[in-house]
Amino acid sequence: MLNYIIRRVLLMIPTLVAISVLIFIIIQLPPGDIITSRLQELQAEGQDISEEQIEALRARYNLNDPLHIQYFKWIGGILVGNMGYSVMYGQSVNNLIWERLGFTLLITFSATLLTWLIAFPVGVYSALRQYSVLDYAATLMAFVGLATPNFLLALVLMYLGYEWFGIAVGGLFSPEYASADWSMGKLGDLLAHLWIPAVVIGMGGTAGMVRIMRANLLDELGKPYVTTALAKGLHPIRLVIKYPLRIALNPFISTVGWMLPHLISGAAIIAVVLSLPTTGPLLLDSLKNQDMYLAGSFLLMLSALTVIGTLLSDILLAITDPRIRYE
Amino acid sequence: MIEVRAGCLLALMASLSLLACGGEERHFTASEESAPAVRAPAEQEGARDIPRDAWPEAWFHAPSKASEIGLTSFKQSPLLDAQVAAGELPPVAQRLPDDPIVVTPIDEIGRYGGTARLFWAGEQLLNVPEGTLRPGPQLQLALPNFAERYEYSKDSKTLTIFLRPGHKWSDGHPVTADDFVFWFDHVQMNKSLTPVVSPRFKGSRIEKNDEHSFSYHFPQAMPLFIMHLAHNSSHLSLPAHFMRRYHPSFTDQAQLEREAEELGLQDWRTYFQAVSNTRDLLVFFKPVQTAYMVVDKTSTRIRLRRNPYYPKVDPEGNQLPYIDFLEVQKVDSAEIMAAKASTGQVDFAGRQFKTSDIPLFKRFEKENDYSVYLWPRPYGSDVALMVNMTHPDDKLRSIFQDVRFRRALSLAINRDEINNIAYYGQAVPRQLTVVESSRYFEPEFASAYAEHDPQRAMALLDEMGMIDRDGDGRRDHTDGSSLEITLEYTIGETPKQITVDLVTAHWREVGLHINLKQISGALQGIRTKGGHMNMSIWHADRNTDILFPIEPFWYVPMHTGQEVTQWPEWARWYRSDGARGMEPPPEVKQLIAWWEVLRRTADVEERIRMGKNILRSQSENLWVLGVIGQGPHPVIVSDRLRNVPTDGYWGWDSRWSWPYYPETWYLQQD
């Protein structure tokens, strides 16, 4: 097992190097760079900016260096923990990401928690009482959830939230608490706002999980060992929890690692719609504006987290399911 | 992937507006809504020029001083009472300048207090980056603001600015000539901070005369420099007493570099910039002259508090501004902003809104307690159509340089149809020229080739020899080869998409098939620089007396930038003193010559004559084509926000709200 983990970790290194080169090339591919897109904004406003000034700025940010030099400058910084400097925000990438990571984690975790809290029991119930009224209801809801784009749901909830409860649309706090110190009132205010993004982000996932859980469990329930155990008089609930459910959990475990990249990129569009202070909009902006260091660091972090997450999933799976262990 | 998702998002936003309308079909036509609901000025057949009496007469003159109206006692916002009582702030009379500036509100004396809600993009609407001078309400005049007065030498080469004694930064430190000298000598003229000196400062120097006056010395006459000061001069000074600490001319550079690194900044330059822009880091609170100062910021909000040293009072001696706090909310998408505005969640907004948002705003105006004011955009044309007269391809260039071609393009456009479809009939169909309130305006400039005459357009094209020779229904090159013209455009700011769609349909009716290609903003810059575009568009701001005389780049090849694509090589020729680019023909050199006189002469008559020469040439040669101008812009004003003029010019030339004294607006408390 230890050998396996070490081998996997070593393999991650060339993977990440290849990814970093790819990311760098892809970001450089579209015409223009951060300077042209920044200046475009200024000129759209009416600021008087000439070609000479653009050239001077480009030189200042080393954008005239050959590509491989730019790449090594960037990757060299990352190796020592300096993700570079965002031209768009005028701050270091480290600062920018840390500033938003807290709320991103909060929202992603609450969404995931919500997903699991709903998906597990509903999925199990649907499988155990297949073709019952409640199963059909759950199935219907699940398909609606799968078919509805998340941001549409966000828009609908925003409208209803405002129309019915008078909650200011978007954001995580009401204006009166936004810059206040932490207090019970502020916590309550946060919770009152948090449910919208949590529901919206969790919705699609919940629907999918319910279906997977139901299908997996149905596969297991028909197997002879279940019949045998029931015939031997094992309590049905204990039986289900102890055997079929454990096996049905495998897909959950193998996807749990994907949560990691979602922590960063999680629902960028929803965050834009709901004005959330998360990393998603930052990623989107940096890509749109070709803010090299910010976008590159984001994508590299995402890739690294995906690779690590996959490894974690595999290890967890090996622990929970002896059948898949490499020996 | 991201692009695709963003695309879906936009489509979905459209359904939000439907949703918000409760599924009802939207009706908004000129006949139903225009006259009574839209508080328009005395209109003549849709003309959207605002009469002078829309604003107090005082706004057209230098603001009075307290001594002139015998004002001797001053009052302050109750918010500051405690701080004054505790000795943290000096009393109001000591915080104001020796002779405070008196501003007349448009309707009534306001009441203190409250928090105004704004969008991130609109913070400056109530916290205007004010400078020494200000634009008059009709965008014709440069009036004193923080500066008491200005004085030109006889040859217009020296401009002396007189500051107001006792005017202070928001930390109580006096505003002096040193603050302007510091910026000029150590920021503008510092190669590291400003790699390319702004053309208007090339070869200039600054001189401190005494604490309260300083002079700019220009190598040539610059009688119109005051227009620049009136429009955009807040950045021409920095609090020297505060900023010296972060500048290597005054502080050890190695130490600044060290501090920058600790803060995660690139070098001392970015450190200096971050300090001068308080919002970036919120570690250093740089003193300001504006009405408000930043006190708190998160990644989605900014909170601002009144500047206790703001130098203006109302006629009863109440220190301005009336409103105590600004709460600025970050909203990432323009559609969500419109949704929030239409549900009454903002006190004043307008940036990022579109003409096409007007029906949505009108629909919810009453039930959500706000009003939509339609302020005309002071644009010569919302969409300026440009053909590239310096295109590298010989055949295309000869067509584009032929004035008959440009006239035919203009005559083929059915402007009334576009006005009705995209503007609810509320805008002005016109040729590209300055706005009507400009002193350079002549009615025939706006009507030149602006009528819809497809017959004449076709006759002009036939005369050029651009005839359909292969029978495919499209006109060809004069030599019979097939003609391909592409109009590349970016969207945003004004109704560009719908305008190009309609215009190309009109052109098809006279046999000209022009391809449309939407490109990204970044690509627009690169395509302009290469001079490759056949045709492109931009919105034609800079058509008021404030900016037309100093930046007439629609009409004179004096600017290289992605906005102006009609003559990139001629402009390059002018900017490089003939070293690069193409030499323009004599009639274009004449434009440059006229502008040189216009910008150097102190004689107002001659200046206007030169300006009209330039504009007359435009009206005959159509260097750039106009479509619809002075279009209505939706401005949202909540019912509790008072003293907001119902009329104003909305755009870059006016800095949106600046001429209309937003410091005199107040919140009705209930």
Image (cartoon, grey):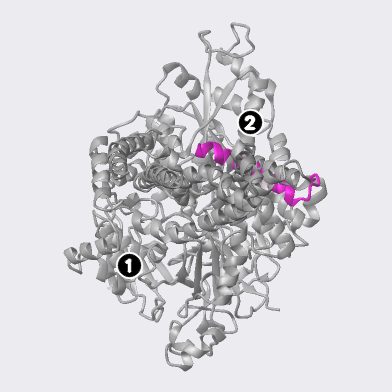
Query: Picture coordinates of residue B64 (x, y %)?
Result: 53, 76
Residue B637 vertical position relative to residue B495 in the rendered view, above or below: below
Query: Picture coordinates of residue B451 (x, y %)?
Result: 68, 32
Q: Residue tagged by mark 1? A: B180
Query: Picture coordinates of residue B512 (x, y %)?
Result: 60, 19
Locate residue B253 relative to residue B568 in the image: left or right. left
Q: Answer whether residue B350 is visible to the viewer in this image.
A: no
- Label 2 sits on a secondary structure element that is helix
Q: In the drawing, what numbered circle is on residue A115?
A: none
Task: Please check whether the numbered discs 1 and 2 fall on a single chain.
Answer: yes
Instruction: Give the magenta range.
Output: B1-27
**Residue B11 drawn in magenta:** yes
Q: Residue tagged by mark 2? A: B501
User: Residue B88 falls in which quadrant of the image?
Assistant: bottom left
Q: Are marks 1 and 2 in contact (CB under 8 Å)?
A: no
Residue at 33% in and 61% down? B273
User: Residue B644 falls in which quadrant of the image?
Assistant: bottom right
Instruction: Report the residue that reaches farthest toward the front.
Output: A232
The chain identifier of the residue carrying mark 1 reads: B
Q: What residue type is labelled 2?
A: Asp
